[in-house]
Every structure is written in C-alpha cells, then in structure tokens.
Image: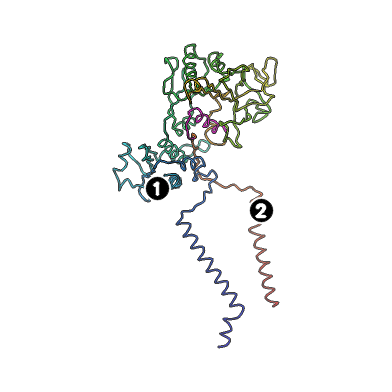
C-alpha cells in the first residue's frame, strides 16, 4: 500500500502529470482559438496577387462613403460563389456600407424596385439610399471566363472588386463624366483594357466624327484624339480649337507612323506652346534595353499625374518628342511629367536602318508626356474653366500590354489623367482583374535538395541524438 502511494509522489509521476497538464492546456487553447477565429471570421489571403483583399484605393473610397449604401447579395443560402462572397464581405462596415444577403427565391419581387432585368444567383445590387441611385453588378461580370491560348484551356479571372468598386463610385458620384473620342482619321481603336478602365471609372464614352459636326458637343468633359494617322481639316481644327479656347479638356496621343504630315493636329499643340519634333525619339540611356533604344522608359517628373506610380516603370514604345516654346503667353503653363535623358535625339528619317545619330537628327532632351494649362478662360469665366490638355508622345502609352495590370506605371498615369481632366473630387479607380487559375508553387532544385536533406536526414538525426542524450543521463542518475 505504501508503494502504491509513493508511486503518486515519485519524480516520474510528477513529470508525467506535468506533461499531461501542458497537453490539456494546449488542446484547450487550440479549441478556444479556433472558436474565436471562426466567430470573428478571421482569414489570411495567401494568394500571390491578393485576389481576396481589397486594394487600398477601394478601401479609401469605401471608407469615405457618407451616404447610406446597401449591397444586396442576391443568392440563396448555400449557393454562394465563395470568391465573390469573400470580396463582397470586405466592404461590410466600411464607411456607411452594409452588405445584406437576400434570397431571390424567398423574396422574388425584391429586385423589381431597382431593376427590370432578371436577377441571377450571385448578382449584387448596390443601392445608395441617400441619393436614390442604384446599379446591378452581374455575377457573370465578376467571374469572367476566357481562353488561355498558351495552353488552349479555359481560364477564369476575378473582377469582383473592380466591378463592385465601380458600382460604388457610380452610385455615390455627384456627376457623370462624358468623353468623346474622334474618328475619321484612322485613329487607334480603343482597346478592351482601355474601355474596361473607362467603364469602371464611370466615364461614358462616345465616338465623334469631327468632320460632320458643327462643334464639339456641349456635354463633352474630355476630348480624346487617339494617335490619328491622317491630319484634321482646317474646319476640324477650328472646331477643336474653339472647344479648347472655351475651357475644354483634352487628351492627345501622337503617332510616329502617321501617313502624312500632321500640320493642323500639331498646330493645336503649337497654339498652346508645344512643338512636336519630327521623327521618333532614340534614347539609349533612357530605354528599357540598350538594344532597343526606342522602347523608352522615360524619367518621371514630380506631378499629380505621376504621384502614385511608385517603383513601376512607365513604358513608351516608339514615341515622338516634344519641346516647350520659350515665349509662351503669361496665362499658359506647360509642365513635362515624362522626359528623356539629355543624350536622347529624334531620328528624322523614318526609313533609316541604323539607330546611330546622323546629320539632320534633332538633339534632345524631349518631353514624352506633358500637361498644358491655359488660365485665360478661367480668369474670365470662372473656376474650373481653364483649358487643360494632357499629351502623350505615343498612342502606345495606352496599349493593352501596359494598362491591363498594375505591372507598369502606364495604368496609374492614365487613371490620374482621367481624374485630372474630369475634375472629379474622387480619384478615378479601375481595379485590374485577378487570375483565378490554380497557382503552383515552384521550388528550385537547390532548395528541394536542401529541404529533403533537412527533413529526411538532419532533423531525424538531431532528434535521435537528443533522445540518446536524455536516455544516457537518466541511466547515469
């Protein structure tokens, strides 16, 4: 009996009891922690492009919403698209935004007060109750099916944040921005990435044939001339000039490969203190690759158009160079925001087979992006009526390859340009899509060998050695 009592007080029992107590405490803590995490809906986005996390721009916009906004997630319980739901729930509680799930089966007539369109599962109705404005975001627009032509397999992209933030901007915006883009001069077409940015920025856009109009429409907030190959007529020049002189806003893209001399188009810029150099810019020091000196990576000057470019590069393939006239009028300011290096020059002979500087080439430096502002109309007609023009040396500045994602600074500069010219109080947002294809983790050969040796050899041997030391010490004692 004494031996039995002693067994509860010996060193081995105490050690075992201590270990058991520690295990129980750890198990209880794990259970409690899991309950807390589930209750608080805490999760970590480990995707490489943070596809389930709102961008800082969307958070800033949503957090600043003062109106009462409801986001109705039209979906029966259990049929939610998880990727859409994860993004949508992040808007809940930001600013005055509330996310509410509505089952269209239980409430079949609920959506009719907002839209006549048939509502499908996973659609979202964004409602501004203060301004009595609403917009429907289709579930099919938030998950976009496409084709990956490198593997000839279906691909899926997530555009939930882009569409929801766009709808939020639309229902909270004070005014609608209207952009007209010219046609009839073989202008570059608006690519899908550009039109996607315009739609998400809630900018209505419409084609205008300036040759058949008496004047630029009154509701034109921004006039875009997108890298025309043929010049404007004298009558068209007069119409556009009148629009600008009356405090118009415009975005011009130049075209190195114009089919004829662009006398009137360039005169529109000359009227506002800018000369366009003949030919195209060659800049070995300011290029993405010295072997391709026309693939320009211009120097980024401090300006609100370049404020959030960050560490990304703005890429301008095959650009014309611009210089500022020295004797501009007092109301006029011309501010470069993209510039070449001092060693740049303009290659005048478009058929030249060598990139080396030759006789007749024009020495730089040049501007490849600049902002023009003429305050004359503002001084005479009131605030906001200044003539403002943003000029890019090439239409390739808005090429899909450079604005589809945030990989390059072109997208940020383009969005800032739209905000600047439209005069909107809120920054123009156009969140890029995210890839939903499965991500694979690639481990380098050297790392594979290292982790194999570590897990299969080193750690087991270390545990064996540690166990042997404990066994040996216990045997000695």
Q: Quadrant of residue 345?
A: top right
Of the pair 383 and 286, the residue shown nearer to us: 383
CA distance separating discs 1 and 2:
42 Å
Residue at 38% x, 39% y is 128
- Residue 416 on the magenta segment: yes
Residue under numbered circle 1: 80
Q: Which residues are magenta?
A: 409-426
Residue under numbered circle 2: 450
Which of the image's four quarters has the N terminus? bottom right
The crowd level at tag 2 (other Cα within 10 Å; few <14, some 14-19, many 20+) is: few
Residue at 54% x, 66% y is 26
Number of the label disc, if any, that sits on residue 154: none
Residue at 66% x, 52% y is 449
From this viewpoint, is residue 200 visible?
Answer: yes
Left-right relation of 356 to 105 = right
Which of the image's four quarters has the C terminus? bottom right
Left-right relation of 93 to 321 = left
- Residue 192 on the magenta segment: no
Q: Nearer the viewer, mark 1 or mark 2?
A: 1
> So how many labels did they put on this image?
2
Of the pair 80 and 416, the residue shown nearer to us: 416
User: Quick check: 244 above or below 203?
Assistant: above
Residue at 68% x, 19% y is 363
């Amino acid at each position: 009996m004494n031996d039995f009592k002693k067994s509860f007080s010996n060193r081995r029992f105490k050690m075992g009891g201590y270990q058991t107590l520690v295990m129980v405490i750890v198990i209880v803590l794990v259970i409690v922690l899991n309950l807390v995490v589930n209750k608080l809906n805490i999760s970590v986005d480990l995707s490489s492009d943070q596809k389930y996390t709102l961008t800082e721009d969307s958070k800033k916009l949503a957090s600043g919403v003062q109106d009462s906004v409801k986001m109705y997630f039209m979906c029966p319980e259990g049929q939610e698209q998880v990727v859409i739901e994860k993004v949508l729930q992040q808007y809940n509680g930001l600013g005055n935004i509330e996310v509410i799930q509505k089952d269209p089966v239980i409430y079949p007539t609920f959506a009719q007060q907002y839209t006549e369109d048939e509502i499908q599962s996973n659609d979202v109705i964004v409602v501004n109750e203060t301004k009595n404005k609403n917009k429907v975001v289709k579930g099919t627009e938030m998950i976009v099916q496409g084709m990956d032509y490198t593997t000839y397999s279906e691909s899926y992209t997530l555009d939930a944040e882009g569409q929801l933030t766009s709808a939020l901007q639309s229902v909270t915006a004070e005014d609608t921005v209207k952009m007209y883009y010219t046609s009839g001069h073989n202008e570059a077409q608006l690519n899908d990435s550009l039109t996607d940015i315009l739609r998400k920025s809630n900018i209505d856009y419409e084609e205008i044939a300036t040759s058949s109009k008496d004047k630029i429409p009154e509701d034109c907030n921004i006039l875009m001339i997108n890298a025309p190959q043929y010049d404007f007529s004298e009558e068209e020049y007069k119409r556009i000039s009148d629009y600008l002189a009356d405090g118009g806003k415009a975005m011009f893209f130049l075209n190195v490969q114009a089919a004829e001399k662009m006398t009137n188009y360039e005169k529109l810029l000359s009227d506002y203190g800018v000369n366009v150099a003949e030919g195209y810019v060659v800049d070995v020091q300011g290029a993405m690759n010295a072997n391709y000196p026309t693939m320009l990576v211009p120097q980024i000057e401090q300006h609100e158009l370049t404020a959030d470019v960050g560490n990304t590069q703005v890429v301008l393939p095959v650009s014309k160079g611009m210089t500022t006239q020295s004797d501009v009028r007092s109301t006029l300011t011309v501010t470069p925001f993209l510039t070449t290096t001092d060693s740049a020059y303009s290659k005048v002979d478009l058929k030249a087979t060598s990139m080396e500087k030759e006789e007749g080439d024009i020495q730089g430096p040049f501007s490849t992006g600049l902002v023009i502002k003429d305050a004359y109309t503002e001084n005479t007609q009131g605030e906001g009526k200044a003539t403002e023009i943003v000029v890019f040396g090439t239409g390739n500045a808005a090429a899909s390859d450079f604005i589809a994602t945030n990989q390059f600074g072109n997208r940020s500069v383009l969005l800032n340009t739209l905000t600047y010219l439209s005069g909107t109080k809120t920054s123009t947002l156009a969140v890029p899509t995210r890839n939903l294809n499965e991500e694979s983790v690639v481990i380098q050969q050297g790392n594979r060998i290292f982790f194999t040796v570590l897990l299969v050899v080193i750690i087991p041997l270390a545990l064996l050695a540690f166990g042997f030391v404990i066994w040996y010490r216990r045997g000695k004692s």
